[in-house]
Structures are given as C-alpha cells and as structure tokens.
Image (cartoon, helix red, strand yellow):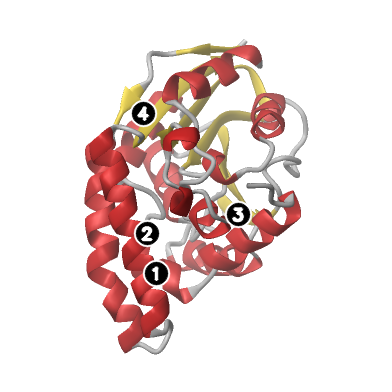
Amino acid sequence: MSLAAEEIKACCAAAYGSPAARILLGESFHPGGATLTRDLIRALRLGAESAAVDVASGPGTSALLLARETGATVIGVDLSPVNVAEAALAAEAARLADRVSFVCGDAEALPLDDASVDGVLCECALCTFPDKPAAVRELARVLRPGGRLALSDMTGEPARLPEQLRTVQAWVACIADVRPLDDVAALLGREGFAVDPPQRHDDALAALLDRVEARLQVLAMAGIATAGEVEQGSSLVALARAAVAAGTLGYGSVSATRG
C-alpha cells in the first residue's frame, strides 16, 4: 500500500475530530483509559515546576490529567482544529486554562522550541504518523537533556496483517502501520534515548475493541453512520480482534530518558 503522507494526516485529523470518534472511543482516545495514562504520567517524573507536551492530544483528556496529577504546565499539540478548540474549552471548564493550552501542530514538525519541555506524553499516535523517525526526532528535539518520554502505542507486524487491515481506513484506525514494540524501543534508542524495559498491554486493546463494537450501532441510531459503514466498522473490529488473538496486533508502552 502506498499512501501520500498528507492524505493520511488529513484523514486522521478528520476522523479523530469527528463526533463518531467520541462516541466510539469515549473521553480517552486510546486503550487503557485513565489508568494507563496515570502509569505513563508517573513514568515522566514531573513536578509543579515542570513543563510538558502531550503530542496528538485529541480531546485534551490526558493533558488535563497530566496537569492535575503533577502540577506541571502542559501544552497539547494536535493536528485537528476541532480537537484543539474543544480541548481548550475543556481546560476552561476544568479551571486549568492557566496551566494547560492547546495548539494545532504536526508531530513531525512540533511548534515548540528546542529543549523546551521536561516531559513528553504520546498515546496511541506514533502508529498513525507517516514518518515515524521524523516524529521521534521531534520528540527528542523538544525535550531537555534528562527529560522523560512516556509513549504508548499500537504494536504488531504489518506484513502479517490481512489485506483488509492495511487500508487507509485501517491506518486511521491505528492498525495498518504498526511496528513491533521492540522496534519502537529501538527507534527511540537511535535518537539518543535511554529506554526502560517496554511493557505490554494487549488486554487493554482487547477491552477497547469490545467497547467499540458495542458502540458501533449507536452511530447508526444517531444518524452519524450508515448501516454499510457500521458493517464495515464491525468487520474491521472482528479482524483486529483476530489479529490480537494471533499475536500480530497488540498494545504497549515505552518510557525513556533523553540523553
């Protein structure tokens, strides 16, 4: 499959800024929800004087949690203007707008200065970035020496996935361009990170697939998706569940320190 990078980015921004994404995924656009996010936040080792960025921040849920848990100043970067606007409203409603802000930006060219943050959070997003090495270089660039990265992502072996899980729709669904967890850790190592032992969270992915399947019918009932689109979504979920059972698709996390 050969897809233009800008097409992929546009599709991802549109999909994750849509009402359908909120219905299917809830407040957290990733497996593991707030429980896994808290684990990643602890791995960042931040305090009240710290600055952090949440890359691909979606509706802002994790950025707000990061600010609450650590007292740090947080900026969320997301490619979707809809997500950025809604996340800013959420920060206002939570009375955290003085410490949490959101901007539109591309993970492969972050709108941040060199060595400007102490921590980087990135959840279930590297798999959607067309140029993964460029994105990791950006994560390293904005971190101060000694700063921490906490990343969770879909994992797997794309060459072993069925053809139906290697389409543009499957790419947007965080599947088509996954990498093995050890490869993600190695990619971080090549950019100067000292990488902690990776952790697997395949059960969290299986639970998310169950929730998505249960909520697909809601899209049709709300007039957001046609019966055909719901059927296509159900097929994608079934194939993803089979891939998880076969060990060719999973979820994992990596934390690391910038050298």
Where is residue 18 shown, x and y percent of the image? 51, 72
Please report whichever mark, 1 or 3, sits nearer to the chain's N-terminal start.
3
Secondary structure of the residue carrying numbered label 1? helix
Q: Is residue 197 above or below residue 38?
A: above
Please report whichever mark, 3 or 2, sits nearer to the chain's N-terminal start.
3
Where is residue 225, by image quadrant?
A: bottom left
Q: Residues within 10 Å of mark 1 (few under 14, many from 20)?
A: few
Name the disc covering residue 101, or none.
3
**Disc nearest the viewer among 4 and 2:** 2
**Disc nearest the viewer among 1 and 4:** 1
Amino acid, disc 4: Arg
Give how far apart the Cα atoms at labels 3 and 2 are. 34 Å
Q: Is residue 172 above or below residue 224?
A: above
Residue at numbered disc 4: 42
Where is residue 124 shown, x and y percent of the image? 46, 43
Residue at numbered disc 1: 232
Q: Are marks 4 and 2 in contact (CB under 8 Å)?
A: no
Give how far apart the Cα atoms at labels 1 and 4 are. 38 Å
Give how far apart the Cα atoms at labels 3 and 4 are. 21 Å
Q: Nearer the viewer, residue 118 or 84?
A: 84
